[in-house]
Amino acid sequence: MLSYLRLCLANSASLTPTMELLKEPELISSVARHYIEKLVSENGPVTAYLDLALELLAANPSKVPLQCILEIVAGVPKLSAVLFSKLDMFKTLQHHNKEDVREMVAQIIAVVVCHSYDTLQIDALIHDLCRNLKDKPLEQQHGFILTLGYTVGRIVRNHLSQAANRSELEKSCRDQLSPRFSTATSLVIDFLFDSPHPLTLSAACLSVGEMGRCGPLLDSTGNSSRAVEKLLSVVDDVKIGSKIREKAALAAGYLSLGELEYPRRKDIIQHFLTATQVFYCLFTDNFPKLCLFYLIPYLAGNERCRNSIYNRRGSSLRRLGCQFTRKSRSLDCERGRFCRT
């Protein structure tokens, strides 16, 4: 029933309802946002829809009800107030036995906390997560790392969404938010270097990428390059699983989006261009998207950031894009499959 209602929501938002669309909650959320806001203003059935999803979630924690909830509250964050009373339930699900459940729960907690907690409550939550992180079972560590990444990322993005000069906003972001969140950021980055299990390394890649996508990385060490250097070494390490290496590639690309004057942007692109043969054997169809689309700053969500960076570096990025396209057409995967761009 909930899947059918999700397709109805997509259809009302002028999307073509297909089963494949259900695998893209981000698309439904972004496109349906204005329609959901209209329903809220007209006292439509949005709250009843959330209540239905919450009932199923309580009975059977799974991907379907979480996708329904995430689509609504991520698109219209003010509706997160409906979930405030259920926050303890979501915190319990941080150590659920399914990885995808923990990831979506972390995103939901980040939305609810950022729009319902005051500054002191947010700081207390972050402190509590950091304090208990290394003493918990593996699944809970995974959930806590993701919650830290998504929460800090959303707070940074909210700070940068103000109507002001982007460079000044980034400077004030470092000055005002670093004292509060640099310890948490550094703790997550440390899991890139010293993860007790591939699961925590995977979570660290996702979290670092999310924080980097939303704004400057608030690393307490002051070394802005250590995260990207480690991510690129993970991508190059053939002993690590391909899914984790794919997440590391995404994270490295995301780091170049959040910061206006990111010093390693061109280095990241060049690294991928010089190592294409290795990556193609892993990612084949996905690699062009990971190493080109996610690295071109005009795809960043922030309009001001996108225009400023693209106008300044557009020609060099286009040249790199053409170089990548020519190279990708000429390479054959070691498995004997032609690698399409």
Image (tube, rainbow, N blue to C red):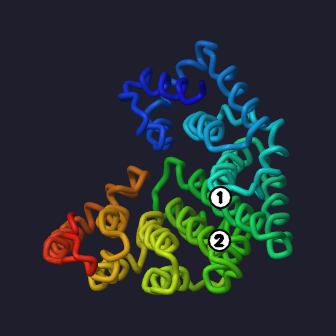
Occupied quadrant, residue 135: bottom right
Foreground pick, 267 / 10: 10
Regarding mark 2 in the picture, which secondary structure is present there? helix
Name the residue tied to disc 1. 99
Check the image and report above or below for 30 versus 46.
below
Quadrant, the C terminus: bottom left
Q: Which disc, if any, is residue 199?
A: 2
Left or right of residue 71: residue 337? left
Q: Nearer the viewer, residue 21 or 160?
A: 21
Give percent across and percent down for residue 258.
47, 64
Question: Of the numbered discs in the image, which one, if any, rests on residue 288?
Answer: none
Specify whether residue 316 is in view. Answer: no
For the residue labelled by badge 1, is the local secondary structure a helix, a strand or a loop? helix
Front one among 68 and 217: 68
Residue contact between numbered discs 2 and 1, judged by CB atoms under 8 Å: yes
Amino acid at dot 2:
Leu
